[in-house]
Image (cartoon, grey):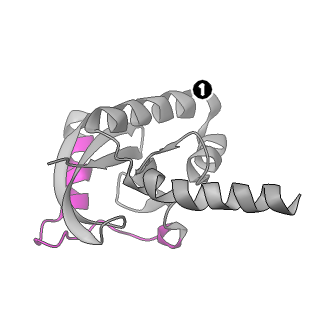
Amino acid sequence: MKKLLAALGAAFLLAAPAFADERATPADAEALVKNAVAYLKRHGREKAFKEFQKLNGPFVYKDLYVFVNSIEGKTLVHPTDPERIGMDVSKAKDPNGKLYVQERLEIAKTKGSGWQEYGYRNPATNKVETKVSYIERVDDLVIVAGAYKQK
């Protein structure tokens, strides 16, 4: 049993960097948001938020995750940074000074869905990279997932 656990542990340690290097695409982000919107409409807000918040759930894929803002800019769901839940992030700026959350909210209010680009620190590289996010509004919610732009 100890040998099996050691082998499994070694396999996990060797595989972990490969998972960290897996990058999702903007198309993956759009698909994840569309799946989240369908789930939300089918199951309601309470159940959907619980599923979206699960770090090992169906709404986390490669380096993507679904998060939710209110139309006013309050964080309602954030699986990788739960401390943000309840925070007003509407005045948040990217490293270049862009009010990216305000831009996101404006896209949601005026178009209902769309794309945006902004600078964001990639935790896998610890560098600021361009993030491409897909946004979709459902009532007073803004559902988002973003992929780092591949060079």
Reply yes or no: does residue 86 show up in magenta: yes
Reply yes or no: does residue 11 show up in magenta: no
**What's the residue at 19%, 61% (across, down)?**
129
**What's the residue at 48%, 30% (across, down)?**
35
**What's the residue at 41%, 45% (across, down)?**
140
Q: Which residue is mark 1?
A: 42
Which image quadrant is residue 82 in? bottom right
Label 1: state its secondary structure.
Answer: helix
Q: Looking at the picture, does residue 138 appear above or below residue 83?
A: above
**What's the residue at 27%, 46% (across, down)?**
133
Task: Single out the residue that lies furthest toward the right.
Answer: 1
- Mark 1, Cα crowd under 10 Å, few <14 / some 14-19 / many 20+, is few
Is 124 positioned to the left or the right of 120 in the image?
right
Q: Quadrant of the N terminus?
A: bottom right
Task: Single out the residue that lies furthest toward the front.
Answer: 3
Magenta span of residues: 83-108
Res. 79 visible in picture: no
Q: Position of residue 93 (x, y in %)?
A: 20, 70
Is 53 positioned to the left or the right of 31 in the image?
right
Q: Nearer the viewer, residue 49 or 56?
A: 56
Q: Nearer the viewer, residue 34 or 90?
A: 34
Q: Nearer the viewer, residue 17 or 147?
A: 17
Count of all numbered marks drawn on residues in the image? 1
Q: Amino acid at mark 1?
A: Arg
Res. 108 visible in picture: yes
Is 5 positioned to the left or the right of 103 in the image?
right
Q: Position of residue 117 (x, y in %)?
A: 16, 51
Q: Nearer the viewer, residue 101 or 54?
A: 54
Q: Position of residue 24 (x, y in %)?
A: 35, 42
Q: Position of residue 116 (x, y in %)?
A: 18, 47
